[in-house]
Amino acid sequence: MPHASPTKSLRAHWRIGHRSLFAGLALVLFALMYLSLALGYRLYSPEEIWTALTAFDGSEADVVIHDLRLPRALMAPMVGAALGIAGVIVQTLSRNRIASPDTLGLNAGAAFAVVVASGLFGVVSLPGLSLASALGALVTSFVVFGLAAAAGGISPLRIVLVGVTFAGLFDSFVNVVLTVNETMLDQLLFWLAGSFADRKLDLAFNGLPFVVAGAALAVSLARPLDILQTDDSTARGLGVPLGVVRGLAFVAVALLSGAAVAMAGPVMFVGLVVPHAARALVGLGHRLQIAAAAMVGALYTTLADIVARFVIYPREAPVGAVTAIVGGLLLLVLLRRRAA
Amino acid sequence: MDKAITVAALTVAYGAATALSAIDLEIPKGKVTVLAGPNGCGKSTLLRAIRRLHQPKSGEVRLGDLPISGLKEKELARHIGLLAQNPSAPDDMTVEELVRLGRYPHQSMLQPWSTADGEAIQAAMFGTGVSHLSDRRLGSLSGGQLQRVWIAMVLAQETDIICLDEPVNHLDMAHQIDCLDLVRRLNQEHGRTVVLVLHDLNLAARYADRLVFLKGGSVVAEGAPVELMSEQLIEDVFGISCRVITDPVHERPLCIPIRNSSPRFRAEQATQL
């Protein structure tokens, strides 16, 4: 961007360029990913981590680092980035700063789709479950936006009301299915709370293409999304085909939150919190906002995943519980400031 | 008279209700045309149909000789700018961020931002007198400032034709005049064709080169304000008995409303007495 946009973002306030900002964020992220390998019930030294990753010999340390910690050190940033970007898009589409994949019911829809696919149709393959998850998020986004728009024009208030209603509905469907099928309950309970623990490395690799595709689509929509922050008439007056852009944006959100739910279960409130931090850092332009949300989201979930190992040490809390506490508090602050 | 836009036998309906019926109208190039009429007469619908925000049931709108139905979205947005009624943007968006949005129809995936874009937004902010506000957030502006910023956004679009839908609705008297003076200056200094929807008949008479009266979805009269504003016509269109005098300052017709003369209103009054 040749013209540095003079916004009062923190980045501008601190007088640092975009490159320094993103380099700094990346550095912190790598540090956190390293800590994610090192910290936990047992602490490991850099040497132990290095041998586990390069010369795996089946020792206890190697197994813990390679099979237990590595998947979550890779998956946590992916899920955080995906939910952060999805949050940015959903908040812009609904013109509501308390919208997120959670409050619009997309995560619950994805979770329901996974439960139905595995419980009723016996889908067990990872690609199958990821696809079910993305489809669940996509269908939910169309239904929620469709119902919210039914009264003419998408009202920011209506969409959250409809979304919260659907989130509640899907949650109770999931509960019904799990109550009927108790063996599933055992397998899915920890997943449903949102967690990066006990995931196989395959799951991370399987989610990656969904996250990459969703992020690429989001970035390609950055300029029309800038325009969609205005009202419909203004956006159309500027030449944005609303239907096309919204449809593609739904697909991006579905890929991102679908992949996130398939990997970690519904990790609460990440999509709500992260866009606020991203906007504070780089302002309202979507190209930078999306990039910043990806970085901040990755940092946030990786950190939350580490914190989750210690809050009830020696046992481990689901990461969704940690993010829900932080997100819930922020939501209260936002409502009080009437930023929504 | 050169025409910028031709409206031919245009009919627009909302579901079963007809909002505009078989409208024929020419918008002259380089002039200020004001669409006026009572509530629900279809003036905003006509403006929005000119900008293709409503699909016509029949008839068409032509830009020069081209039917607008054949133009691509961005192409149309490079010819006609629109300031919508009650436009909205996030409170924490800065003035410059909003004005930059006006460049969207000139940009593409391959060329997201050019020098021409930078010059256009600087010129638009300068022309509307908001350059000094460029870093301010929209939520911190007064109503008058905010409306100037929105006009700057439409100007940055660099279109020959600018449509404004009730741009002075929520402004006090000083800012109404300020805003409309600005619009007329853009017309006179830059030769842009302006189509305005205005509620206030006297403001319409003061700023219009050409005045179009609508009633019940049809054009009932059009012409220069001096020729058009007769007491009889105003009574027919607005249902109000009035005196029309000549504004001693601007030498434009000035309507002094006396009383509501519509038959229904008179009947209601009679029953109350």
Image: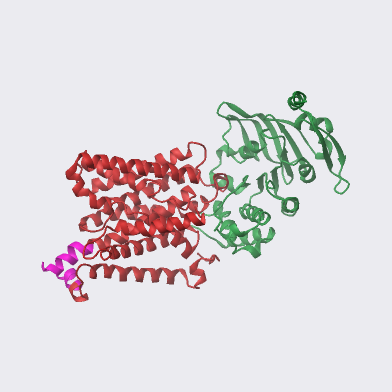
Chain colours: A red, B green
Q: Which residues are magenta?
A: A49-70
Residue A53 within the segment the image draws in magenta: yes
How far from the left and from the top, in percent, is residue B214?
A: 71, 33
Q: Nearer the viewer, residue B102 or A270?
A: A270
Q: Nearer the viewer, residue A267 or B84?
A: A267
Q: Does residue A228 appear left or right of residue A64 in this picture?
A: right
| Quarter holding residue A201 | bottom left
> Residue extending furthest left?
A58
Viewer can see residue A288: no
- Quadrant where the image shows the C terminus of chain B: top right
* Image position, residue A214 (x, y; %): 36, 52
Instruction: Please state if A64 lies on the left or on the right of B142 as rendered.
Output: left
Asked whether residue A247 is in view, the answer is: yes
Relative image position of residue A73 (x, y in whole percent):
26, 64
Q: Report the front residue among B152 and B92.
A: B92
Q: Main secondary structure of the magenta part?
A: helix
**What percent of the width, then of the height, locates residue B23?**
67, 30
